Image (spheres, rainbow, N blue to C red):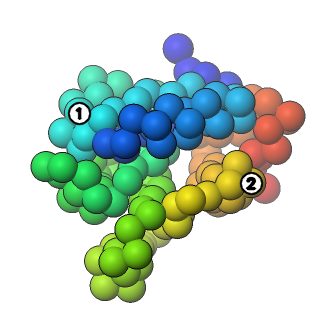
């Protein structure tokens, strides 16, 4: 069953970051599917791809990095949206992460407002999320 605010697949190998981000997303009204690695995220996406509207993934994770995960998930469902996040100062947005339509970058650490604004970019243009979205979270279609 679809969550009115949407479902987000959250992939981060840091348990505390994943837990805190999950709590923020839930407060914003989202359903969250957590994954501790890129491979775990890939498996979760294969099982539940139709209900996932946005994938929020760390860039650097053991085994399967965020940009690699993006490519694999795009093969399954090209229209899915992505937010790649990193706190690693060595990650360069220009050279390491090819940002294209449907992919945004969020620098860690981020505030609740930063996360909310980044997600608004995706849901603003999405046909999947519409007036069903809970007004209190202010993520609406423009």
- Furthest residue to the bottom? 94
Residue 72 visible? The answer is no
The kind of secondary structure element at disc 2 is helix
Tell me how far mark 2 sits from mark 1, CA to CA.
27 Å
Of callouts 2 and 1, the N-terminal one: 1
Residue at 61 percent of width and 30 percent of height: 23
Q: Which residue is mark 2?
A: 113
Residue at 62 percent of width and 36 percent of height: 25
- Furthest residue to the front? 16
Answer few, some or many: residues within 10 Å of disc 1's Cα (few below 14, many 20 plus, some between 14 and 19): some
- The picture places residue 3, in percent across and down from the top left corner, at 61, 22
Q: Is residue 5 left or right of residue 82?
A: right
* Quadrant of the snapshot with the C terminus: bottom right
- The picture places residue 91, in percent across and down from the top left corner, at 35, 75
Residue 51 vertical position relative to residue 139 in the rendered view, above or below: above
Residue at 24 percent of width and 44 percent of height: 38
Q: Which residue is mark 1?
A: 40
- Furthest residue to the top? 1
Residue at 33 percent of width and 33 percent of height: 35
The kind of secondary structure element at disc 1 is helix
- The picture places residue 112, in percent across and down from the top left corner, at 70, 49
> Viewer-proximal residue, 50 or 107?
107
Residue 51 found in image quarter: top left
Q: Which mark is residue 48?
A: none
Residue 10 found in image quarter: top left
């Amino acid at each position: 069953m679809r969550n009115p605010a949407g479902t987000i697949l959250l992939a981060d190998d840091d348990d505390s970051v994943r837990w805190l981000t999950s709590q923020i997303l839930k407060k914003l009204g989202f359903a969250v599917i957590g994954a501790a690695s890129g491979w775990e995220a890939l498996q979760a996406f294969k099982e539940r791809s139709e209900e996932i509207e946005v994938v929020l993934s760390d860039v650097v994770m053991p085994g399967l990095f965020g940009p690699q995960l993006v490519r694999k998930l795009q093969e399954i469902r090209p229209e899915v949206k992505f937010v790649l996040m990193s706190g690693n100062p060595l990650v360069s947005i220009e050279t390491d992460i090819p940002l294209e339509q449907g992919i945004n970058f969020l620098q860690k650490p981020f505030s609740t407002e930063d996360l909310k604004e980044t997600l608004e970019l995706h849901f603003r243009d999405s046909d999947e999320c519409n007036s069903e979205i809970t007004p209190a979270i202010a993520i609406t279609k423009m």
